[in-house]
Amino acid sequence: MCGIVGYIGGRQAVSIIMDGLKRLEYRGYDSAGIAVFDDTQTISVRRASGKLRNLEEALRQNPTDGNFGIGHTRWATHGRPTEENAHPHRDSKGNLVVVHNGIVENYLVLRHGLQARGHVFLSETDTEIIAHLVEDAFTGNLEEAVRAALAQIQGVLAIAIISRLDPNKIVAARQGPPVVIGLGEDEYFVASDVPAILSHTRDMFFLADGDMAILTASGVTLTDFVGNPVTRSVSRILWDPIMAEKGGYKHFMQKEIYEQPRSTRDTMLGRLGAESGRAFLDEVLISPEQMRGFRQIRIVACGTSWHAALAGKFLIEKLARVPVEVDYGSEFRYRDPILGPDTLTIVISQSGETADTLAAQREAKSKGSPTLAICNVIGSMITREAAGMLMTHAGPEIGVASTKAFTSQLTALFVLALYLGQERGTLTEAQVRAQIEEALKIPGKMEQILASEVIYQNLARSLHKAKDFLYLGRGIHFPIALEGALKLKEISYIHAEGYPAGEMKHGPNALIDENLPVVILAAYDPDDAESRLRYEKTVSNIQEVKARSGIVVAISNEGDKEIAEMADYVIPIPVTSEMLLPLLEIIPMQLLAYHIAVRLGCDVDQPRNLAKSVTVE
Ligand code: F6R
């Protein structure tokens, strides 16, 4: 995620940039930094780990200012959240500095190449590479050097760069993450998001992918990465500042639901090779030999992360044929679990601070089991204590009810299962390639689902008075049913239960009457015989619910006429493979819960009795 801000004009830049960073702190907050071109014609940099107030303190102790500069608030992806890893990052001689939001995918190759040419790196970040690449290409004109550097970089980025050797300009570029340019009177702004600059101007435009902006005190020039001129139309932004922080959405949870195509794409980035047809997990710090050697896997987590863990069991057992057991963090250490060095223990946590999950991780370590953290916060306790890390790139999640972190966890588990299957030889090359091709289409399919919000508003209108809900799924869809039920109960306070669809006749059928909405996961992969079989069984479940006058809400393949005839309400989703369906089918359930909670007037972002991180037992 991360947030960037830049200013150029007649005023002193530091307070403008710091004010912008404060408004972007929601994008990440593990460290921050600022750089300005000062009176001595050099670039002075101040950085601090931790919250923005630490940077404020650093500036109080060692003030600086100038008429142009850039700043950054960080959400770590590569490298721990230390001062050395905080942005801005500089080139070898301190002539230029860069702030960056995104991921340089080929950073290892580039870093090795630069080191071979004598460049010395001061941080563990992928961003520092950009500064050195620009340094290498610089012959007097900053934008030309940035273009040359960009030509070598694979990945996603939003950057802003200033140089002492070609001063009085900020060069910004976008390939992926957002960049907005603000137009004032003889002053110009660049930022990751509207709220950072809204108190200075309402006239803005967003860069498109492949755009570069050169900001000076007298105007903004726009080109593509090759140097051809481009134009973008300016909009007048009428949001109030609070609305702006939520990106125009009513709640953070709603914004985070809509961010899922991005967070899913980012979590796949660099790990699923479209051309090579291979899965890569070079960064996990557990060697491929070790990965091949584990005889069993334990996954431990709490709440929503536990639901991801349960889906992970299906993914890993199906794709890699390793036996997996799943535990609640709160139960694990009280039952003397049997595990040792031949067991990989995976701990899943959005925050990386959940006390029960951390205690379970320590229990596994004490028994000699290597631990792998699937986590959203680098530098958190769980990542610090793990042997290996697989970061989810969801960015900060502010709504208490987890949404984008959950789909990022599912994505990370899918990548891990595919990688294990590839390394252990349980999948053929063609099978790995086919899964990757399908996975890369998921963000686009999520966008399709998110395009029709009105379905959920209408459903919420019809169903918000229900006192209880049931959620049913089979196989990998059962954990998703549990997650759908959790979303509804935690934000709307309506009682909801998730159940394996096949277990209905062993008791819960007694609950069904004309007042009970039953959400049934009935999407399937028509090309997969097992998935078709599960579908047929699910169709029988729908008939059983209908026979008892229950209200069926079916999440099914688009164009499925059979389900449309049986169900009271149908939510169509695009077709995908069985193992990837969870990533799509959870979104309608998140939106249904959200719209019901809004209708009931509940505090969606901070539901009663709950906290975002549960750091006590
Ligand atoms: C529910 C939710 C919680 C968390 C749980 C674990 O929406 O967010 O159930 O999933 O408290 O938190 P992490 O993943 O931070 O360990």
Image (tube, rainbow, N blue to C red):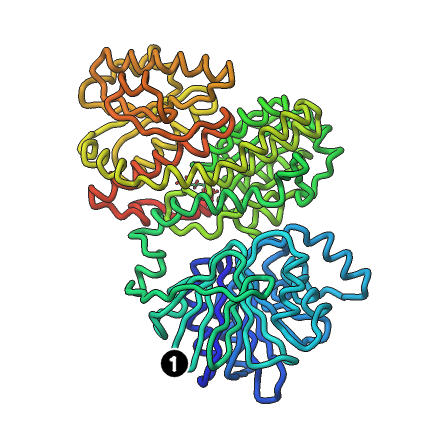
Q: Quadrant of ligand 1?
A: top left
From the top left corner, tell me how far across and down residue 33 is, in percent.
Answer: 55, 70
Q: Nearer the viewer, residue 228 or 34?
A: 228
From the top left corner, tell me how far across and down residue 235 is, in percent.
Answer: 34, 65
Numbered circles on residues, count = 1
Q: Is residue 154 visible?
A: yes
Q: Is residue 495 above or below residue 234?
A: above
Q: Residues within 10 Å of mark 1 (few under 14, many from 20)?
A: few
- Please identify the quarter of the rendering in which residue 94 is found: bottom right
Q: Nearer the viewer, residue 316 or 257?
A: 257
Residue 444 is left or right of residue 472, and the answer is right
Q: Nearer the viewer, residue 137 or 435?
A: 137
Residue plotted at (50% across, 28% down): 311
Q: Nearer the viewer, residue 554 or 211?
A: 211
Q: Is residue 31 visible?
A: no
Q: Amino acid at mark 1?
A: Glu
Mark 1 = which residue? 185
Residue 332 is left or right of residue 236, and the answer is right
Q: Is residue 574 above or below residue 539?
A: below
Residue 244 is left or right of residue 74, and the answer is left
The extreme bottom residue here reads: 39
Ligand 1 lies under 8 Å from the Cβ of mark 1: no
Label 1 residue SS: loop
The extreme front residue here reads: 228
Residue plotted at (63% across, 79% down): 166
Residue 250 is left or right of residue 193, and the answer is left
Placement of the C terminus among the 4 image quadrants: top left
From the top left corner, tell me how far across and down residue 181 is, in percent.
Answer: 44, 68
- Please identify the quarter of the rendering in which residue 387 is found: top right
From the top left corner, tell me how far across and down residue 125 is, in percent.
Answer: 65, 59
Residue plotted at (23% across, 18% down): 550
